[in-house]
Amino acid sequence: MMGAMSADATGLDPQQSAAVLAPRGPVCVLAGAGTGKTRTITRRIAHLVAGGHVSAGQVLAVTFTARAAGEMRARLRTLGIGEGASQVQARTFHAAALRQLRYFWPQVVGDTQWDLLDRKFAIVAQAANRVGLSTSTESVRDLASEIEWSKASLIAPEDYPVAAARTRREPPADASKVADVYAAYEALKVRDGAMLLDFDDLLLHTAAALEEHSTVAEEFRDRYRCFVVDEYQDVTPLQQRVLDAWLGERDDLTVVGDANQTIYSFTGATPRYLLDFSRRFPEATVVRLERDYRSTPEVVSLANQVIGAARGRIAGTRLQLIGQRPSGPEPEFAEFDDEPAEAAAVAKSIAKLIANGTPAAEIAVLYRINAQSEVHEQALTELDIPFQVRGGEGFFTRPEVRQAVSALRQTASRADLPEGADRGPALITLVKAVLVPMGLTDAEPAGAQARERWASLGALVALTEELLTHEPDLDLAGLLRDLAARAEARHPPTVQGVTLASLHAAKGLEWDAVFLVGVTDGTLPIAHVLGDSKSAPDEAGIEEERRLLYVGVTRAREHLQLSWALARNEGGRKSRRRSRFLHGLVPEDSPASRIAAPAPQKKRPRCRVCGKQLLGTAATMLGRCETCPSNLDAALFDALKAWRSAKSKELKVPAYVVFSDTTLTAIAEQQPRDDRALVTIPGIGAKKLERFGADVLAVVRGDDPVATAQASLIEDV
């Protein structure tokens, strides 16, 4: 029996209600960020089923991620349509096509066998080898991306060069060579009378089956009568072809989207089907959802200003969001001399939010490219703030960074290095020479994967330069020790922490507090859309970058800060400028509206043995230069390791989560006797002091921590 909640529009605002109660037929819901689109479309499905317009089993709802499809199914189960909830099909495009193709394949193709190719890397590498192109990981991934874009855009191999030029693609190799790889890839998927189908082939064959076989089309269209498409601004020409094949001559279609959140054009996604919906269906009901239930009015106001400056056709569909939450703090803007200063300030602000009650899992640091995460991982680590990297790997676990460090180790082991070639200013030259064969070039390369690799390698060079400013005589062995210590200190936490994510990976998510970092020209918007002396700016690309910033702003519920740094390294030349997208947005009374005054130099700790400034994480944690003599109490060190082992088993976490070996070494050397002495050791913050301080001090005194705790408990009783 149908419940009242799902049969009517109870609890919905007027626009949501209009979308839910719209008559059967074409409906277009323009839904801004935070306006409750999932709630609206699931209620619409429930309303159509309850009203007898369609049976639950005749509804096919498609979206772009399995997570979103799962959320839609979960919402439907709560709406009182009983067994009907499980009959509504809520799937991704590819999952729906796979299910249909498996059913119809024997009717369409016969006995020819096929298998799903869920990883195309090996075959693309084979195709690249045949054509004579590089088979490096990044090159193959970029070639695979071009093939996926072509198929999603319904572009055949022979048409790729012209299409790539027309759409201003940046092929990872000569366009004709990419086309040859594409053709070879398609040929390699047919073997011994069997076929391998990639995810795009699922859509192509499903569309062809419905277009070319009337009996298949009739059976399918008798099965499904009503279609709902979420995130309609992100459909590709191939997905639209499948949707058209599903519909036939019918028009029982509801689409939901926001052209101002179109940020995946590089994959073939296009908002034109959303923009042209009323032209295709003149009788369509169009509803605009503009009440934002996610963010405070202050955040909403900034979001409206960001997208209000948009240009081009998409700008004509602009939604003016109206914040529905209570008032909150104004968004903040901050300018810093360099990236380390920016990261340190952001980490300090995060620590303050956590101390004031905001859960770490409700805080995010968002950036344009993954290579930007390194400096923020370091800053959070130094303050003992747990974090997780979403949609990517931590900096030191990325394949290109691991490979680079391995290559530097091999170089350090060579016996033929000229004297002084790995020390001081020459160290930079050496590091660059090692990284050049791995993809480090003077100019930013074409191809998304190649650019990510290039940026990560550049970050390693920048880190080396920064370390040299503090220790001018640094050598390669010292650099490798510092990199190893940094990598060890950044093991992912076993509990949820602050999220570090690229803006693309943040789409569809939200947090109480968001820090948008690195908002400079050349980063956001990204450099390759700005043009140079050889090419004009890519205006469409610049507008997509503006929409990316808009998506980032609308991820914040309450606290929002946008920041940028004028230089990459500490003491570097301040050649950067804040993003053009911030023009007119930074309040005149904000300190960030002026060039930042030079930040006071942070005092670096000194060695407790020789008095020199300490360099590197390991030395800082030990409180002495690694070359200075150690006064390690070996027995105490063994006792600390035994305690850590027992504690890690008790908590069911790896030992390094409790304390690293370096921290235990520092404790065994310095032998702190009270809390004040203990927290002076880097790596022991307030949280670890609270959790483990009493135990550690008991071990240092030579007591049994368990016995001490039991005795204390008896005294309390």
Image (tube, grey):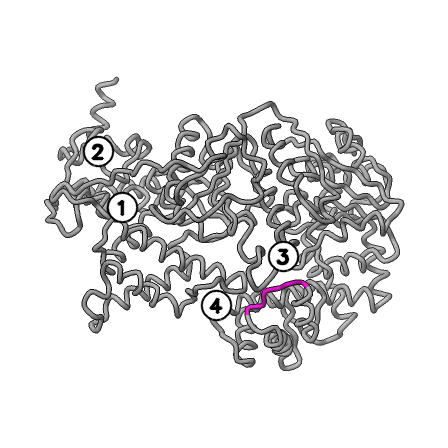
Crowdedness near tag 3: few (<14), some (14–19) or many (≥20) residues, C-alpha within 10 Å: some
Contact between labelled residues 4 and 1, with CB atoms less than 8 Å apart? no
Circle 3 or circle 4, nearest the eye: 3
Amino acid carrying label 4: it is: Thr
Q: In which quadrant of the rendered image does the C terminus lie?
A: top left
Amino acid carrying label 1: it is: Ser
- List the residue tagged with mark 4: 137
* Residue nearest the viewer, comparing 603 with 49: 603
Q: Which is nearer the N-term, disc 1 or disc 3?
A: 3
Q: What element carries label 2?
A: helix
Contact between labelled residues 2 and 4, with CB atoms less than 8 Å apart? no
Residue 81 is left or right of residue 423, and the answer is right
Q: What element carries label 4?
A: helix
Question: Which of the labelled discs sits on residue 3, or is there none?
Answer: none
Residue placed at 17% from the left, 48% from the top? 625
Above/below status of 445 relative to 703: below
Circle 3 or circle 2, nearest the eye: 3
Residue farthest top in this picture: 717
